[in-house]
Amino acid sequence: MLARSVELFNTHGYDATSMSDLAAHLGLTKSAIYHHVPSKEALLRAALDEALDGLGSAIDEVAGPDRSAEQRLRAAVEASVRVLVARQPAVTLLLRVRGNSPVEQAALARRRELDQRLTALVREAVEEGALRDDLEPELVSRLLFGTVNSLVEWYRPGGPVSPDDLAAALTTLVFDGLVRR
C-alpha cells in the first residue's frame, strides 16, 4: 500500500492526491485504507521516514575512527547513492516536500540535520588536508549531495548501470574529476 501511495504522490503531488484517488489507485475502498492507516498524512510520514532512515543509516554506517574523513565522505556518497537507488520513490518524494504540513516540516528538519552531518564531514576532510580549503564546506556538501539527489530525475533501476557502478562513477567523478591524469 505504501509503495503504491508513494507512486501516486510522486505522479500527482501529495497535496493534489485525495484519499479517493488513493482508493481508486489501490483498488480498495477508503474504509479499507483507513483500516490500515489513520490518514493520508500517515502514509506520507512513513514514506519520508523510509527515505530519511535510509539516508541516516548510510551516514551512520561510515562512521568510525578507523577511516579518515575523506574515506568516510567517499563512503557516505557511495552509500547515499545506493540508498537513493534502493528507495528511489521515497527519496524522490522527500526531495519534493516543501514544508506545507507538520509532517513535511519535520522531514525537512531531519533532512537539515543530515545536511549538517555531511557538511561536518566535508569540514573534517578539509581540516585533514584531503580536500581543497578554498571552498566553503557547506557549499561543497550541497553541490556534492545535490549531484547525488539529481539521480532521482534520470536513473532507472534495472537499466544498464548497476547501483554499485553508479556509486563508483559518481564518487570518482566528484573526488577525482574528469581531467585525464
Image (cartoon, rainbow, N blue to C red):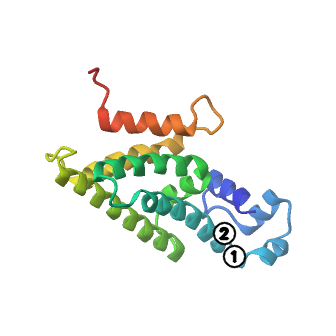
Give the residue drawn at x 71%, y 79%.
38
Q: Residue furthest left?
A: 134
Residue 23, how many percent across, how many down?
80, 64
How far apart marks 2 and 1 lie (CA) works out to 7 Å
Residue placed most toward the observer, 31 or 62: 62
Residue 96, how many percent across, how many down?
51, 56
Q: Residue furthest top?
A: 180
Q: Mark 1 — residue?
A: 39
Residue placed most toward the observer, 119 or 128: 128
Disc 2 residue type (three-letter): Leu
Say if mark 2 contacts mark 1, CB within 8 Å: yes
Q: Residue furthest front?
A: 66
* Quadrant for the C terminus in the image: top left
Residue 172 against residue 14 in the figure, above or below: above
Q: Quadrant of residue 157?
A: top right
Give the residue drawn at x 61%, y 52%.
89
Give the residue drawn at x 41%, y 52%.
76
User: With 115 as the anchor, is 96 left or right in this view?
Assistant: right
Q: Which mark is residue 43?
A: 2
Residue 69, how many percent across, how many down?
29, 53
Circle 1: is it few (<14), some (14-19), or many (20+) Cα within 10 Å? few
Residue 154, how many percent across, how many down?
54, 37
Disc 1 residue type (three-letter): Ser
Q: Secondary structure at mark 2?
A: helix
